Amino acid sequence: MEMLNVLNAWNALPLAELEVGKHLYWHIGNLKVHGQVFLTSWIVIGLLLVASIAATRNIQRVPSGMQNFMEYAFEFVRDLAKNQLGEKEYRPWVPFIGTLFLFIFVSNWSGALVPWKLIKLPEGELAAPTNDINTTVALALLTSLAYFYAGFSRRGLGYFKKYIEPTPILLPIAILEDFTKPLSLSFRLFGNILADELVVAVLVLLVPLFVPLPVMLLGLFTSAIQALVFATLAGAYIHEAMEGHGEEHHEEHS
């Protein structure tokens, strides 16, 4: 009987009334898209644009304020790309890797710092863009296109030799690897951000005063780490696509 009372009390909580998969849909022609993801993504992009304009509006020799912050962010992204791609190859890929890192970083932190749920929508609710699997899959597919482009532009048709090296028997495994890379990137980012927001939401519901604060601080840290991991893996995949076994063998004997 006591267990039944506990279950009834739990079912009476507002959390139990949430409908999974409820979204604000926009109809664009024959397409149906998640409106709340576009709204939060545009807000994140707007914040990045405002910060960029503020940092470059009046450039000084001795940086300060927003210019100093953005120069530090640029140096961090540049070093990240250099570490993954090498001194000779990193420069063309700094904008791509930097955009990935900054967008994911600001998106993740927006989920922890911005009270999205206070903004009411006709359906669904606002959340961090990376809290939606569609966003993380799109970022992962862009990364896949980037490393395919990097490999093909660097090595031409020789890029496809990697699928049969060192033996054609490994062809199915090599093809499977190209599918698992974007899957692992997208699900790792989505799962961590969703889990963090769910843990904070449950703790706020159960113990609304002090317990959620350390978890929120930990969430900020893990959100930053997730952005760093995604950008680092993107750089590593691009570097892997540009180098070949034949080139490595030649460099070892030169």
Image: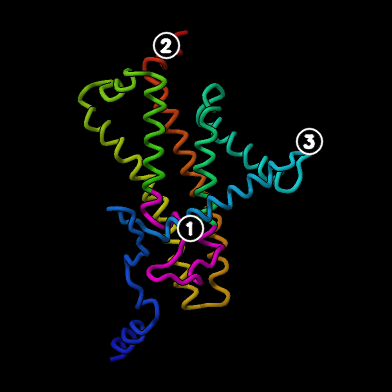
Q: Is residue 251 above or below residue 183?
A: above
Q: Is residue 248 above or below residue 78?
A: above
> Is disc 3 in contact with disc 1, using a CB cutoff of under 8 Å?
no
Q: In the displayed structure, does residue 169 sit left or right of residue 67?
A: left
> Is disc 2 in contact with disc 1, using a CB cutoff of under 8 Å?
no
Q: Which residue is the site of mark 1? A: 40
Mark count: 3
Q: Residue at x 42, y 20 (%)?
A: 154
Farthest residue in the right direction? 62
| Amino acid on which disc 3 is placed | Arg
Crowding near the residue tagged with mark 2, few <14, some 14–19, many ≥20 C-alpha atoms within 10 Å: few
Which numbered disc flags the more N-terminal residue, 3 or 2? 3
Q: Residue at x 54, y 73 (%)?
A: 211
Assess whether residue 122 is covered by the magenta stretch.
Answer: yes
The residue range painted magenta reads 110-136
> Is disc 3 in contact with disc 2, using a CB cutoff of under 8 Å?
no
Which numbered disc flags the more N-terminal residue, 2 or 1? 1
Q: Which residue is the site of mark 2? A: 250
Q: In the displayed structure, does residue 96 sit left or right of residue 5?
A: right
Q: Nearer the viewer, residue 251 or 137?
A: 137
Q: Which residue is the site of mark 3? A: 61
Which numbered disc flags the more N-terminal residue, 3 or 1? 1
Q: Residue at x 40, y 31 (%)?
A: 147
Farthest residue in the front direction? 29
Quadrant in the picture for residue 32: bottom left
- Tag in front: 2 or 1: 1
Q: Quadrant of the N terminus?
A: bottom left
